[in-house]
Image (cartoon, rainbow, N blue to C red):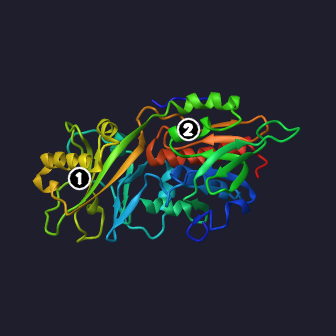
């Protein structure tokens, strides 16, 4: 059960630092600063923009979406994090339906093998709607980012509650960037995984009592790692009859996804193999060749020797892949500093729905909280 707590330009993407020396960066005042361009951060920023504000979203990675990640291998999209989108709330489904010019596969995965437990068992309940995107799940994140000021490859170095003479501490936030730039805003949202948000807050000076109340709450959200192998097979390899395999007894493997079943007819056979959290945690820092070979061999023991003989493999390490089921909070958390600035934390661990739907709804809910707590924004 969820834990209750009190209370881009044309394509939406750009880099913050365009080659201007760090000493020339001015302190820029923003309406709202969002750290993290996952689904939660994008939903929050999109909602704030719809209310007439101009949020800026800072993302350390090269793309948006977080675990809604799609890479291209010789032009073929491969979802190596979230494999499909699912939900039941009208607000989320309306957003999903808004993605333009996207070919979708309803009810994917339609054919399952094995009796293992999915990451989110509710995805296969009768009341849930499941959708795969033929072009990759990152299309949803790119749609949400459209029209937003999203600054990629931008690392946040420090958060500082601004102290001004004669004013209470925390009238506004100062966000200092590794590039040398500085942004200020009255509202700051952290939408990265909860452990990463906690680390950033622990480094914040001056340390305020509000942080001491907030940090234990963030600690309730537990994340799980996931080692992932992408495997492409030679032309002529027979495709499996299933679209998802959920082995119950495997020590290493949690899920095998027949990713190419979502792609255009004739696409090369591609599997995405995801490890169990325990196996991932044990081998997180081992050489990639070691754990990827173990995963391929165990997959072959489950479904045939052909799986151990791909023509190409790629790997990915998700250190904070997903939130442990049952550790989700009932909603986003937000605090107001003595000077009136607000700090909020949202993400898939801050809504009982969990997953992408929970992340989206959490971001939307935090936008509402911000507007209630700081009605005079900007």
The 10 Å Cα crowd at callout 2, few under 14, some 14 to 19, many 20 or more, is few
Query: x and y percent of residue 62 in the render?
Result: 49, 61
Query: x and y percent of residue 247 in the render?
Result: 21, 42
Quarter of the rendering containing residue 106: bottom left
The 10 Å Cα crowd at callout 1, few under 14, some 14 to 19, many 20 or more, is few
Q: Is residue 172 left or right of residue 367?
A: right
Q: Nearer the viewer, residue 45 or 51?
A: 45
Q: Nearer the viewer, residue 122 or 82?
A: 82
Q: Secondary structure at mark 2?
A: helix
Q: Is residue 245 at all visible to an observer of this figure?
A: no
Whole-Å distance between the Cαs marked 2 and 1?
41 Å
Residue depicted at x 69% and y 28%: 209
Q: Secondary structure at mark 1?
A: loop
Query: x and y percent of residue 238 in the render?
Result: 13, 63
Q: Is residue 287 at all visible to an observer of this figure?
A: yes
Residue depicted at x 66% and y 44%: 159
| Most distant residue in the left direction | 305
Asked if the residues shown at circle 2 and circle 1 are in contact, with their CB atoms under 8 angstroms apart, the answer is no
Q: Is residue 334 above or below residue 43?
A: above
Q: Is residue 73 left or right of residue 222?
A: left
Q: Is residue 309 left or right of residue 41?
A: left
The disc at residue 199 is: 2
Q: Is residue 323 above or below residue 180?
A: above
Residue receiving disc 1 = 111
Query: x and y percent of residue 214 in the render?
Result: 61, 31
* Closer to the eye: label 2 or 1: 2
Sequence-earlier tag: 2 or 1: 1
Q: Nearer the viewer, residue 89 or 10?
A: 10
Q: Nearer the viewer, residue 18 or 77?
A: 18
Residue depicted at x 56% and y 37%: 198
């Amino acid at each position: 059960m969820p834990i209750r707590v009190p209370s881009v330009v044309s394509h939406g993407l750009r880099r913050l630092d365009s080659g201007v020396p760090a000493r020339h960066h001015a302190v820029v005042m923003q309406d709202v600063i969002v750290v993290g361009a996952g689904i939660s951060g994008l939903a929050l920023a999109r909602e704030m923009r719809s209310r007439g504000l101009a949020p800026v979203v800072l993302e350390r990675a090269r793309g948006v979406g977080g675990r809604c990640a799609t890479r291209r291998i010789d032009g073929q999209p491969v979802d190596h994090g979230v494999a499909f989108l699912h939900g039941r709330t009208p607000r989320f489904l309306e957003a999903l339906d808004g993605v333009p010019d996207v070919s979708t596969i309803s009810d994917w995965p339609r054919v399952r093998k094995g009796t293992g437990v999915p990451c989110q068992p509710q995805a296969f309940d009768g009341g849930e709607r499941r959708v795969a995107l033929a072009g990759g799940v990152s299309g949803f994140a790119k749609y949400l980012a459209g029209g937003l000021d999203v600054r990629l490859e931008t690392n946040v170095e420090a958060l500082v509650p601004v102290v001004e003479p004669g004013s209470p501490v925390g009238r506004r936030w100062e966000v200092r960037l590794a590039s040398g730039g500085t942004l200020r805003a009255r509202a700051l949202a952290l939408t990265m995984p909860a452990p990463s948000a906690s680390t950033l807050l622990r480094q914040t000076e001056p340390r305020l009592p509000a942080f001491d109340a907030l940090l234990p709450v963030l600690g309730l959200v537990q994340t799980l790692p996931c080692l992932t192998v992408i495997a492409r097979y030679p032309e002529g390899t027979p495709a499996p009859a299933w679209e998802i395999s959920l082995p119950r007894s495997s020590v290493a493997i949690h899920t095998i996804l027949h990713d190419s079943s979502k792609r255009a007819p004739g696409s090369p056979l591609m599997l995405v193999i995801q490890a169990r959290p325990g196996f991932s945690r044990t081998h997180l820092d081992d050489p990639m060749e070691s754990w990827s070979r173990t995963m391929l061999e165990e997959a072959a023991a489950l479904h045939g020797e052909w799986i151990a003989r791909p023509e190409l493999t790629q790997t990915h390490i998700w250190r904070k892949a997903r939130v442990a089921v049952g550790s989700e909070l009932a909603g986003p958390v937000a605090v107001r500093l003595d000077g009136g600035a607000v700090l909020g934390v949202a993400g898939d661990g801050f809504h009982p729905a969990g997953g992408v739907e929970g992340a989206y709804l959490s971001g939307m809910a935090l936008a509402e909280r911000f507007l209630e707590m700081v009605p005079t924004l900007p």
